[in-house]
Image (cartoon, rainbow, N blue to C red):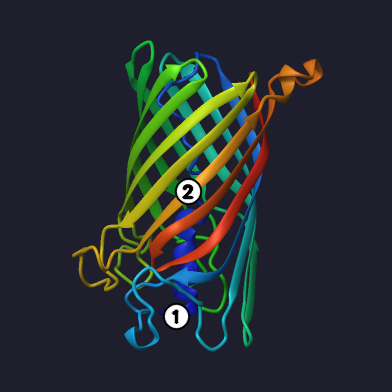
Amino acid sequence: MKIIDNIILVMIILLAPSTVFAGGFVSNPGSVFVKTAFQSWTADAVFAGQLQTDSDKGVELGDTAPFDEVNGGEFKSQHLSISASFVPLERLQLDLFLPVLQFSTFKDRSFQSDSVGVGDLYLGGGYQVLKFDKVGTTINLKSKIPLASPNEDQLSIPLSTGQFDFTAEQQTSWAAKPALQFTARTLYRYRLSASGETTDYDYRDELEFGFEMAGSPVDAVWLKLGVSSLWSLGSDDPGTTERTENNGDQIHDLYLGAYWGIGKYLPVAKGLALDATFTVPYAGQDYPRGITWNAGFAYSF
């Protein structure tokens, strides 16, 4: 697989909203949540897929391999994003996410490419279909509207897949205690080709699963620990749709998050909070292997 092919695969998870779950509960009507955040991703290797395996060199599926055996390589991407949620009616929540500015760079011993621009727009909404005292389930429907350039010349780093995505997701939360909550999620992503034609860069549909545990050790502070897994529902050959355990692109992440309600301790900052997440992939196939961190300020009222 060409280096640019590997870089494009990053877009599947890099440009999407944070994997930290919103949960199965919808806030009270009239609630507003706004967040601005900075995210940084750095990868200098890939989880080997079928085309990177080499039995003679001992490289098996899922092993760590360089972007290129001769020239190595490192990929860096950062973006500044805004997100907002509004609850207009009981159980109904509307969401928006937009990377307003992105910086992406790939370089190795013989090549360097840089791209700057806006990201894709994500719009959606969720409805809490199950509402009990301690258990809630919300169904979310979202769409990705491509605004950024896919840079299909194979020389520039892509800022987008250039395709529309539609997702259906369920999140179920159990508030075991006031300061302890568990959330499970499943998501299906349908990918629509912008051109209507199948090409090497037409991504396959995806399936995601995740589980998160969140607890509040002290007032106004929440800590999160979660896992998230993504599978591509197709083979490396765009002419087929068969997926097996050995040919599906996939990535499995472990993340830690912290949420500190600053306004609890500073009355002048009522509603303000610091939100941070650190994500590390622990397994995968045919995906760049890199560490991601995200930090920002959230305001709710």
Badge 1 density bin: few <14, some 14–19, many ≥20, Cα 10 Å: few
Residue 43 coordinates in the image, percent (x, y): 57, 66
Which residue in the protein does label 2 denote? 254
Q: Where is the N terminus found, in terms of image quarters?
A: bottom left
Identify the secondary structure beneath mark 1.
Answer: loop
Residue 179 coordinates in the image, percent (x, y): 52, 19
Question: In the image, is residue 136 above or below residue 69?
Answer: above
Q: Amino acid at mark 1?
A: Lys
Residue 69 coordinates in the image, percent (x, y): 50, 85
* Residue at screen point 64% across, 53% down: 79
* Residue at screen point 42% across, 19% down: 175
Whole-angstrom CA distance, mark 2 to mark 1, is 27 Å
For the question of whether residue 17 can be seen, the reply is no
Q: Where is the C terminus found, in terms of image quarters?
A: top right
Q: Amino acid at mark 2?
A: Leu
Identify the secondary structure beneath mark 2.
Answer: strand
* Residue at screen point 27% across, 68% down: 247
Residue 27 coordinates in the image, percent (x, y): 49, 18
Would residue 69 appear left or right of 129 to someone viewing this image?
right
Question: In the image, is residue 149 above or below residue 135?
Answer: below
Quadrant housing residue 192: bottom left
In the image, 200 versus 194, the foreground residue is: 200
Badge 2 density bin: few <14, some 14–19, many ≥20, Cα 10 Å: some
Quadrant housing residue 173: top left
Which tag is nearer the camera, tag 2 or tag 1? 2
Q: Are marks 2 and 1 in contact (CB under 8 Å)?
A: no
Residue furthest toward the top?
133
Which residue in the protein does label 1 denote? 2
Q: How many marks?
A: 2
* Residue at screen point 35% across, 79% down: 53
Would residue 219 appear left or right of 155 to someone viewing this image?
right
